[in-house]
Image: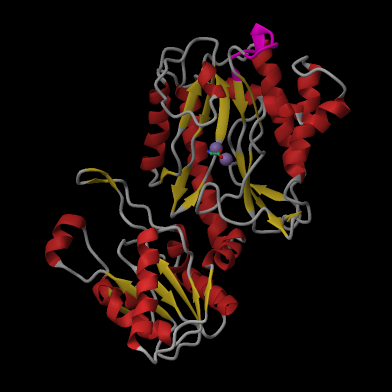
Amino acid sequence: MNQREFAKRRRALMRMMGKGGVALLPAATPKLRNRDVQYYYRQDSDFYYLTGFPEPEALAVLAPGREAGEYLLFCRERDAQRETWDGSRAGPERAVSDYGADDAFPISDVDDILPGIIEQCDRVYYTIGLDPEFDQRVIAWVGALRDRGGAHTPDEFIALDHLLHDLRLYKSRAEISAMRRAAKIAVGAHRRAMARCRPGLYEYEIEAEFLHEFRRRGARLAYLPIVGAGPNACVLHYHANDRQLQDGELLLADVGCEWDCYASDVTRTWPVNGRFTAEQKAIYELVLDAQEASLAAIRPGAHWNEPHDAAVQVVTRGLRRLGLLEGSLRKLLKDGAYRRFFMHRTGHWLGMDVHDVGDYRVAEQWRMLEPGMTLTVEPGIYIPPGSRGVGRRWQGIGVRIEDDVAVTRDGYDLLSRGLPRTVEEVEALVGADAI
Ligand code: GLY
Ligand code: MN
Ligand code: MN
C-alpha cells in the first residue's frame, strides 16, 4: 500500500470531521505472553488504516484545517542501543519523510504538546473503551487544560469509530488488491493441505502445510486456524488441532492469512481418504447448493440478509428432503428449524479484521450491498455425534464451505477463486501429493 493511499484515507476522514475537530488514534500496545516473551506485534487496524506506520508506542493526531499541520505523529525516538535489540525505528524524522506526517514529535513529549493542540479544537474524536489505560491519558490531557484555568476545553467527545468504520467498509482498489493477494495465498495453502492429506496424519500436520505456505509467501495467520477431523468438524471454534485423521472421516479446515494487514477467511471440507461417503456427499452438496444460492444473491442493491435468507431456504429444504428435519416447509422456515444444524450466519464483513468493522443495519434496516464491500459466504451444516433423533449414519458430519467476495457494479468478484468446490474437484485433489 503506498503513502498516497494512506493520505487519501486521512483526507476522507478529515473531510467528515470538519474544521475544529481533532482525532486521536493510538498504536496497538505490545502484549506479553509470559514473562518477557511477547505476542507477535500486530498494528491496530484503525491506526494502520490511516498511517501505514508499523511501530508500537505511537499516536496519530488529525486536526483538519490546523495551520501548523493537520497530520501529526508522535513516535519513539531513534535509540542506537534499543535498536540493536529490537530493530530499527523510524523516529520523528522519518515519520515525516517516509510516512507523510506534517510534523512529528517524540512520544515522550506527548503530555507537554498534546493538551495545547486539543485546546485549539472544539471536538475530540476518540474511541473510548478499547484501551482503558489510554482513556485515562486522554482524560488527563483534558484535565491538564482545566487545571491551567482560562484554557479552552473541547465541547464534545465524539466516537471516532462510527465515522472511521464506515470508511473502512468501502474498500478501495488498493485494498481489494491486498485482499485478493491474501485470498490467493490462502487458496494456495488450502490446495497444498488437500493434496498432502491422507489418513494417519494428525490435524497439526495439516495445519503445518498452511503455515508453511503462508510464511513462504510472506503472509501470517489472520486468526487461529481451525483444522478439525471427524467430530471436531462440528466444533465451530475448534483449534486444538491434535487428533489423528481416521480413514472415512471428513476434515474441515478454516484457515486464512493476512497480507499487509488485510485478511482472507477460507474454509474447505474434504474426505481424509479422498472419497466422500454417500451421506458426506449429500451434506456436502447441500452446503455447496446453499453457497451457490447465497452467492447468486450478492449484487449492489441486495440487502445484507438476502444471501443468508437464500442459504437458509436451501438448507431447510435439503435437510427436510434428507429426513433430518420433519414437518411442513413453511413451519420449518417459520421456526428457524435449520438453526439446530446451521447455527452461524452465512457471512460477515471481511477486511483488515477478519470479522471486519461496519454496521450490518442502518436505521434498523439491513444495510444494502454496494460496490467495494467485501464479505465472506460460508454456509455450514454440523451434525455432532450423539445428535438426538438423527440416524447414526449422519452423525459426526460437519461441513462448511467459505469463500471471500467483493461486491462489484454488477454482482461480485470471487476473491478466493481457484480452489476446488465441487465433489469431483475436491476428490481429484485430495491426496494427490500425499507422501
Ligand atoms: N474463521 C472465522 C469465520 O469463519 O468467521
Ligand atoms: Mn468467516
Ligand atoms: Mn472462517
Residue under the point 58% across and 34% down:
419
Q: Is residue 136 above or below residue 103?
A: above
Q: Residue furthest top?
A: 392
Nearest the viewer among 153 and 161 is 153
Left or right: residue 261 versus residue 298 is left
Q: Looking at the image, how many numbered discs can be counted on the residues?
A: 0
Q: Is residue 303 above or below residue 251?
A: below
Q: Is residue 82 above or below residue 93?
A: above
**Can residue 33 be seen here?**
yes
Residue under the point 14% across and 59% down:
84
Q: Position of residue 292 (x, y in %)?
A: 73, 35
Q: Position of residue 162 (x, y in %)?
A: 58, 64
Residue under the point 68% across and 13% down:
279
Q: Position of residue 123 (x, y in %)?
A: 51, 79
Residue 390 among magenta residues? yes
Q: Quadrant of the C terminus?
A: top left
Nearest the viewer among 83 and 58 is 58
Q: Position of residue 401 (x, y in %)?
A: 62, 32
Q: Is residue 273 above or below residue 267?
A: above
Residue 423 among magenta residues? no
**Can residue 53 be seen here?**
no
Left or right: residue 215 versus residue 77 is right
Residue under the point 40% across and 19% down:
202
- Judged from the image, the quadrant occupied by ligand 2 is top right
Left or right: residue 369 versus residue 59 is right
Quarter holding residue 25 = bottom left
Quarter holding residue 332 = top right
Instruction: State the colouring used for the structure image.
Output: secondary structure
Nearest the viewer among 343 and 307 is 343
- What's drawn in magenta, residue-wise? 387-397
Task: Kindly report the secondary structure that dominates the magenta region of the rendered protein.
Answer: loop
